[in-house]
């Protein structure tokens, strides 16, 4: 486990107060920026609970009132379940489903941030960001809070094509299964898009796939740390850059996924600057333009998105800053150190058993 996990839990228990984040958000900014320093993360071995999932996922899907595949390659919506009530086998099935489908949506969720922290621990050690603010006593919680009063300097030169990212990929053990609950939304806007890293790889030509499989890329957290320093905030760990494979293998599905994105990937190792920029700019445009392997969520209040940061990219749409408040919280379990297995397969080369449970019918429609 990460070296600071135990000490952080002690700190959290010592200062924890029962907070209603939604109420706090309507009163204004509530995150704190403590000067707490944490030990640097060290590599650890991750055993994914998706390995214990039932391929048919009966424990998870049988109690659902509807299971809807939103696109062929990514995105499933499940009705009739409450995440905080899932038992261990249902959580394992969920880990497997998210590994296969990339992102799964649950609406009308009652789970609160305290239950969310406990829920997240099933999927891996909870990541603590080195410089973002967080609710008092809850360093594992990443807050989403934007409204008409938000600082817009970043958005003056921001292109949403560059907004695609996977969370904290600069860590030695980046994020795995991750979930976000939004409890407050503007009247319109504020959607989020996800793209499949599996399908992004599959859409490339075989010669280019083989070329990429031999490459590694630098992922950097320096921009975030430098921004924190400019704002007068503490950087709680040593700023880090890490090298990861451009194509990684998912440990549960065994499928190959493209693993670069404009959010944190900075260069390709072992090639010239011009070559690196050409490769990465092509791949970034490939992800942004991949409308055939993207899904877009129109949030409702108390919707939870559960996604796999190892095999997806996501992009929040900041079109609502003149409309109203968008608020929620994210829990980010860490997973394995990224690796590439040359014997792994693409999703397209694997037989995938798909299932759709219609709301008005009994059982499932099975498709191969």
Image (tube, grey):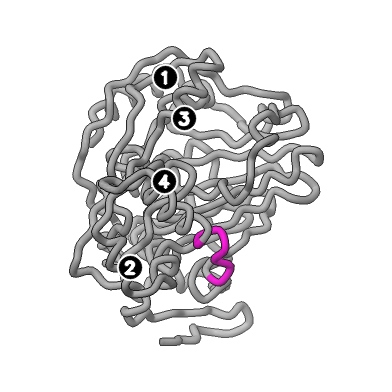
Is 162 included in the stretch rendered in magenta?
no
Name the disc covering residue 152, or none: none
Residue 90 seen in the current view? no
Question: In terms of depth relative to the viewer, which is nearer, 9 or 160?
Answer: 160
Q: Do the residues labelled 1 and 3 touch (CB within 8 Å)?
A: no
Q: Which residue is drawn at 56% across and 17% down?
A: 231
Residue 59 vertical placement versus 85 (above, below): below
Pointer 3 residue:
223
Residue depth check, mark 3 versus mark 2: number of the one nearer the observer = 2
Q: Where is residue 260 shown, x and y percent of the image?
A: 40, 52
**Marks 1 and 4, the one that precedes in the sequence:** 4
Q: Residue at x 55, y 41 (%)?
A: 112
Q: Which residue is drawn at 31% across and 61% down?
A: 212
**Distance of label 4 from label 2 (alpha carbons):** 36 Å
Q: Dot 4, crowdedness within 10 Å: few (<14), some or many (≥20)?
A: many
**Marks 4 and 3, the one that precedes in the sequence:** 4
Residue 228 vertical placement versus 180 (above, below): above
Residue depth check, mark 4 versus mark 2: number of the one nearer the observer = 2
Q: Residue at x 27, y 72 (%)?
A: 345
Query: Which secondary structure lies at badge 2?
Result: helix
Q: In this view, does 173 lie to the left or right of 156?
A: left
Q: Dot 3, crowdedness within 10 Å: few (<14), some or many (≥20)?
A: few
Numbered-mark total: 4
Q: Where is residue 306 shown, x and y percent of the image?
A: 48, 54
Query: Which secondary structure lies at badge 3?
Result: helix
Q: In this view, does 295 lie to the left or right of 298?
A: left
Q: Dot 1, crowdedness within 10 Å: few (<14), some or many (≥20)?
A: many
Pointer 1 residue:
235
Q: Write down the region rendered in magenta.
A: 286-292
**Marks 1 and 3, the one that precedes in the sequence:** 3
């Amino acid at each position: 486990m990460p070296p600071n996990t135990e000490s952080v839990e002690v700190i959290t228990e010592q200062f924890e107060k029962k907070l209603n984040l939604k109420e706090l958000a309507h009163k204004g900014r509530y995150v704190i920026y403590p000067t707490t320093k944490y030990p640097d993360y060290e590599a650890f071995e991750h055993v994914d609970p998706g390995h214990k999932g039932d391929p048919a996922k009966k424990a998870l899907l049988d109690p659902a009132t509807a299971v809807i595949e939103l696109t062929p390659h990514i995105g499933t919506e499940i009705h009739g379940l409450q995440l905080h009530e899932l038992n261990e086998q249902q959580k394992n099935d969920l880990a497997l489903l998210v590994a296969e489908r990339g992102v799964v949506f649950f609406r009308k969720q009652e789970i609160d941030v305290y239950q969310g922290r406990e829920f997240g621990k099933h999927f891996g050690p909870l990541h603590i960001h080195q410089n973002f603010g967080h609710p008092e006593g809850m360093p594992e919680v990443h807050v989403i809070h934007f409204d008409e009063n938000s600082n817009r300097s970043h958005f003056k030169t921001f292109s949403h094509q560059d907004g695609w990212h996977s969370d904290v990929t600069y860590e030695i053990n980046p994020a795995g299964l991750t979930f976000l609950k939004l409890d407050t939304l503007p009247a319109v806007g504020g959607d989020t898009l996800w793209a499949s890293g599996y399908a992004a790889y599959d859409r490339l030509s075989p010669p280019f796939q083989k070329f990429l499989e031999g490459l590694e890329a630098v992922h950097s957290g320096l921009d975030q740390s430098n921004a924190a320093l400019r704002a007068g905030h503490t950087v709680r760990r040593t700023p880090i850059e890490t090298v990861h494979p451009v194509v990684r293998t998912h440990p549960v599905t065994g499928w190959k996924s493209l693993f670069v994105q404009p959010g944190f990937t900075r260069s390709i190792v072992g090639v010239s600057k011009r070559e690196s920029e050409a490769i990465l700019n092509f791949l970034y445009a490939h992800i942004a333009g991949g409308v055939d392997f993207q899904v877009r969520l129109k949030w409702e209040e108390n919707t939870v998105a559960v996604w796999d940061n190892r095999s997806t990219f996501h992009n929040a749409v900041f079109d609502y800053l003149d409309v109203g408040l968008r608020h929620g919280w994210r829990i980010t379990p860490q997973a394995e150190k990224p690796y590439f297995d040359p014997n792994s397969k693409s999703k397209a080369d694997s037989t995938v058993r798909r299932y759709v449970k219609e709301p008005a019918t009994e059982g499932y429609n099975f498709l191969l």
